[in-house]
Structures are given as C-alpha cells and as structure tokens.
Amino acid sequence: MRIYLDCIGCFVRQALDSARLATDDEQIHEKVVREVLSLAADLDMSQSPPVIGQQIHRLIRELIGNSDPYRELKQRFNRLALRLCAELEERVRASEDPLETAVRLAIAGNIIDLGVKTSIKESDIEKIIRDCLTADFDGQQIEGFRNAVSRAGKILYLADNAGEIVFDRLLIEQLPCEKVTVVVKGRPVINDATMEDAEFAGLTKLVEVIDNGSDAPGTILESCSEAFRGRFAEADLIIAKGQGNYETLSDANKNIFFILKVKCPVIARDLDCEVGEMILGRNEAFRDTVDLVEEAE
Amino acid sequence: MRIYLDCIGCFVRQALDSARLATDDEQIHEKVVREVLSLAADLDMSQSPPVIGQQIHRLIRELIGNSDPYRELKQRFNRLALRLCAELEERVRASEDPLETAVRLAIAGNIIDLGVKTSIKESDIEKIIRDCLTADFDGQQIEGFRNAVSRAGKILYLADNAGEIVFDRLLIEQLPCEKVTVVVKGRPVINDATMEDAEFAGLTKLVEVIDNGSDAPGTILESCSEAFRGRFAEADLIIAKGQGNYETLSDANKNIFFILKVKCPVIARDLDCEVGEMILGRNEAFRDTVDLVEEAE
C-alpha cells in the first residue's frame, strides 16, 4: 500500500506522540516534528507508510540516545498479555472451533499498537477481547485459512507487536507447529516484537523463531536480511499480523493471509472495510485461490 | 495563544481537508500538503495558529485560482441557519433570561466551522442547538457579561463564520444595538463571514457592520486595516466569537469576552476545560474585573 496524503498529518502526530512517550525533553519533541516535516515535504509517495515510520523511529532513538526507548512499555504489555492469556488458552481449548477462536484472539491482541495510539488502557484491552470473541466474522475466510494451513509446507508467521505476540501464541498453538517459523524484528522499533518478546511469550520453545534483520515497523523486504528474504521466498504460506505488515506486503505476489484489526481510515479504504473491523483476509494476488485439501491429508 | 507542536499535524490535515473541499484536483491537494510541510518545518512557534491558517488558505486560493472557493458552502450554511433561527428567535423572546438563551445559541452557531471539521450534517447542527440550550453553563459569567455590556460605551462584536453569523444576530438583538459594531473579515478565508454574510443575516439593518481588512481566520491585528485597529483600540468591550479569535486575541490587553464552543484539545488545555465545552469567558487580563453597574443606569 502506498502513502496517501491523509497519512502525512498522521505521521507528524504519531512522531510527536512517540517522541513524548520516549522522553520528556520538549526540545527533542520539537526537533522530531521539524525533521519529520522536512522528510515529508520531499516524500516519495509511492513508498509504503512504514518506510517513513522506520526513518522517524531511527531519528527518535538517535536524538534521545536510546536504542530501545519503549523496552519497559513492551515488557509491561507482555506481562499484561500473559496474565490475560492464562484464561484465554482454556477458552480456545473449550471452544467449538479452536482455530477460529484463536484467530479472533490474535486479532484482539493487535490492539496493542503504539504506532497508532500511544495510550491504551488495560480495561480497553479487556473490552476489546470480549468484543472480538463475539463480533461478526467471515466464516468463509476461516475455511480458506484452514485449508491453506493444511496444504502449506512452510509457514512464516510475521509477528507484529510486543504483548500482541503472547496472543499470537494462542493461534500458533493451533497450527502445525513443525511447519511454522515465527518472524520478529531484527532491531527494536516502537513496540514491535523482537526476539526477547518471542522468548517471553514462550514461542521459542514451541516453534522456530527468526528475526528479519530490519528495524522497519512492517516488512520492507529491501530492508530485511538476505537470510530472511530467502525464507520469505521459500515459504508457501505467510501469515502477516497487523497494519504495518499489511501496508508493506499488500502488493506482494505471495500467498499471504493478513490478520489485523483496522485502526485507520486509509487502511480501511484500501481494504474496503470500516475502521474497527476484524480482518482475516487473503492477499489480492491469491484471493481467488481455492485450497482443495485432499482426503489423505 | 501560541502554536503548540500538537497543532502541526492538524495544520496538515486541515489544509488537505480544505483543499479537497475547494477542488477535486489531486495534484493541487498534494501541492498544498507539500507547501504546508515546508512552511511548518521552519515555523516560528511563537505566532498564533491563524497566522499559518492565513498562509494555507492564501495558497489554496492561489493554486485553484478562485478568490472565494467556499462561497457556495457559506451561502448554504447561511440559508440553513436562517431557517433554524426563525423558530429560535421566538425561543429567545419567550425564555426566562433572553440574554443567556441568546449566548447559548451564539455558541451553538459556532459549530459551523469548516476550519476544524469539513463535514457537518444538518442533523448534527440541530442536535447541537438542543444540547447548547440545556448544557451546564456558568451563571457567574453571564452576570459578568451582562454587567460589562451595561457599562460599555463602544462594543465591537468580532464575528466568526458564515451561518454562525445568523445565530450571532439573535445575541446582538439582546445588546444595546446603538453601541454595537459588528466586524467581519476583509476578504474571504475558509468559511469566515464577510460583509455579504452580514447582509444576508440581516445585521447591516440592525447595527453598524465594518470589515477588518484582513484575510486571516482570526483577528491578527498587524494584518488588519488601520481603520479597524483604531476601532479596536477605542472599544471598551470586545465580544470575540470562535476559536480563531480566541487564538489570536487571548493575550491581548483588552476587555474581551470570548464566546465559543471548544473543538480542539490544544485550546481546551489553554482554557483549562474539556473539548466540547461552551465558553463565555473573559480575557485573562480582565478576568478579575467586577463591572459594578450603577443604579442610575
């Protein structure tokens, strides 16, 4: 997805919010805003929004001299998610369709997104979980997803944020774990999950976890390591979590299922849906694929 | 009030909204956004926000080659307001305290503000009027206002937007009309009221109406005509409508009552109130003034 003009005011606001979250130094807040303005004035609008996010967050880290300013916040979200998930694991197990319940919870976890909104209350998260368990959801998509998972040989699960990654575990537990590799970011960027978060979430004991070598808040292939790009090319099913991965991979010619909660009107327009909707959606290029699962499988 | 860092993302969004409202040409939308970004990157933050608004709207008018791109929209709001006001006039007359009811309606009219939000539905306006008639409102301020009006010799009423100016008439009818001069903008800027709107609202038959010689969406004295500045200096009571007038005059050393509906979090913080509140508030410099009205008056 390319950058829309509507994104630009939002970049400025998000940069300010993130700078404020990282430091109380108002001079740095102003510097960040001014730099983002200069950056945006000469912007190549054919890029995806996370290209700018990557530059903004590099700038913030550099200006405050801290390579991981949101580390404590990420740990707080991880602990909160772990506390909530104890009960939810049981809920998945007891449900009529554990895969669907786990997908719903993985979407609920996607609300923990500092890139969009810096203040999230614990009570909000609990409410969102309840809503996601009961909201309307497209059954056909679930069947398509179930079949694609069954047929796939190599599945890459692109994680999104800390905290959220604990919810992802509930879904990954429903997948054929021996085929799944989880991917986290190579270096810290906002509250995106890194290896430390995958370990905390218990994923490293469950599946292979690799990092993508990049500090972009999405999956910009040119910014990722060669090793990751090889794995991406090889995979026959990609599960991509969150808005950043949607923005960077929506035009990729791969078999991708996007799992996210839509939090911005531009993405909603791109997906032809409403803000707030729960999305389990297949990549444009593979949308009409029907995964016929053979009897023998 | 100076520009806050929070204003900057908002300038970009407002500029885009205004450009879209004025033309469907996407190249102009992009040009406007890029120019606003350059403007903002070197911004003198000690200015008031309407200084930027003035530049943005000059740019939009220049790029689309139309000196009054919102004229039709202003006329539509004027007609809507006139239709609503027929019944409201009666309501003011029949009310226990006509001055207070008229102030409430003048605040309700302040919702017609394209500078803040480009889409306002007719049903929204009707709901806001009902809410404004019953919402909590500080009685002390009304008494202070009533006394200040009684004591004043020369009252300047700084109008804000088209449509809104029809609601202002209801309040002006409650003032000693021979002392009141209404001020409109010297040239079109967004949907701010000009002489044409004052005429439509029936104000020119009721009181003296002058223009301030400026195209700023507020009252930037340096941008106004010398004639207006003289009248401003001479007046012993200023009634200033809307956010733009608050932003430009909140630090002025004059006896000013601001009348507005708070529509942005930065102004809410500056006024120490909540977004959505109805404000009838005196200028800081005169806040502790008690206007003793003598028996004889």
Image (cartoon, coloured by chain):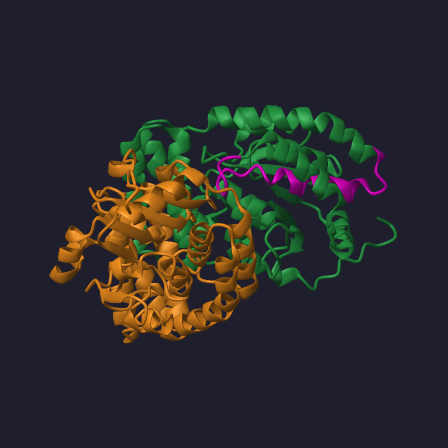
Chain colours: A orange, B green
**Which residue is at 25% across, 47% downward?**
A249
Looking at the picture, how far across and down is residue B175, in whole percent? 74, 40
Say how many tags the image has: 0
Looking at the picture, how far across and down is residue B218, in whole percent? 50, 45
Residue lying at the far right of the rendered structure: B295
Q: Is residue A5 visible?
A: yes
Relative to A138, A293 lies left or right:
left
Relative to the observer, which residue lies in front, A258 or A124?
A258
**Which residue is at 73% across, 34% downward?**
B173
Q: Is residue B100 magenta?
A: yes
Q: Quadrant of residue A266?
A: top left
Residue B105, above or below A232: above
Residue A264, above or below B141: above
Q: Which residues are magenta?
A: B94-119
Relative to A103, B202 lies left or right:
right
Relative to the observer, which residue lies in front, B31 or A158?
A158
